Image: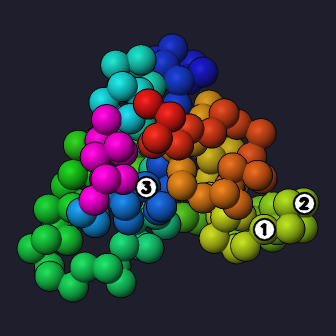
């Protein structure tokens, strides 16, 4: 748990942000899961790395700005990706035999002292020791 607030810290990776950007049933499931997690006193965290993965999806600058503003409203913290994170990610790759993307998210979750993760990634689910939530769990 977060020592600062007493609330549990939940990391959202890019799979959640990408699904939120697209229309469909998963988008609605994510909205519902976020609402319930916030009601259960989780604070939502993410990273600039997760946001960066959205750049290829949206080319309309106004829509992208609206989306980044949505991220800011949902997240208590959006952390940058640092050079040290890349070095630590190489250890995650060796430990978990995972992709660089998954390793970076695992590294960020550790640095941000997360207590759980909301993801659609089976790779992250397999590699992390944290509780993993899937939007369809709610």
Judged from this view, the residue extending furthest toward the right is 95
- 16 up-or-down from 55: above or below: above
Q: Tag 3, which secondary structure?
A: helix
Q: Is residue 43 magenta?
A: no
Q: Tag 2, which secondary structure?
A: helix
Which range of residues does the magenta coloring cover?
Answer: 24-32
Please name the residue that numbered disc 1 is placed on: 98
Please name the residue that numbered disc 2 is placed on: 95
Q: Residue 58 is drawn in which quadrant?
A: bottom left
* Residue 71 image point, x, y percent: 28, 52
The residues tagged by marks 2 and 3 sit, at their Cα atoms, a distance apart of: 24 Å
Please name the residue that numbered disc 3 is placed on: 16
Q: How many marks do you count on the picture?
A: 3
**For the residues bearing labels 1 and 3, Cβ distance under 8 angstroms:** no
- 53 up-or-down from 67: above or below: below
- N-terminal label among 2 and 3: 3
Q: Tag 1, which secondary structure?
A: loop
């Amino acid at each position: 748990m977060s020592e600062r607030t007493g609330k549990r810290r939940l990391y959202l990776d890019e799979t959640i942000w990408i699904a939120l950007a697209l229309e469909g049933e998963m988008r609605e499931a994510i909205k519902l899961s976020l609402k319930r997690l916030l009601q259960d006193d989780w604070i939502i965290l993410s990273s600039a790395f997760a946001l960066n993965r959205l750049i290829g999806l949206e080319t309309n600058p106004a829509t992208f700005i609206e989306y980044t503003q949505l991220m800011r409203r949902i997240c208590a913290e959006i952390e940058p990706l640092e050079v040290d994170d890349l070095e630590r990610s190489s250890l995650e790759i060796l430990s978990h035999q995972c992709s660089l993307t998954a390793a970076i998210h695992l590294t960020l979750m550790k640095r941000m002292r997360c207590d759980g993760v909301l993801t659609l990634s089976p790779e992250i689910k397999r590699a992390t020791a944290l509780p993993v939530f899937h939007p369809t769990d709610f």
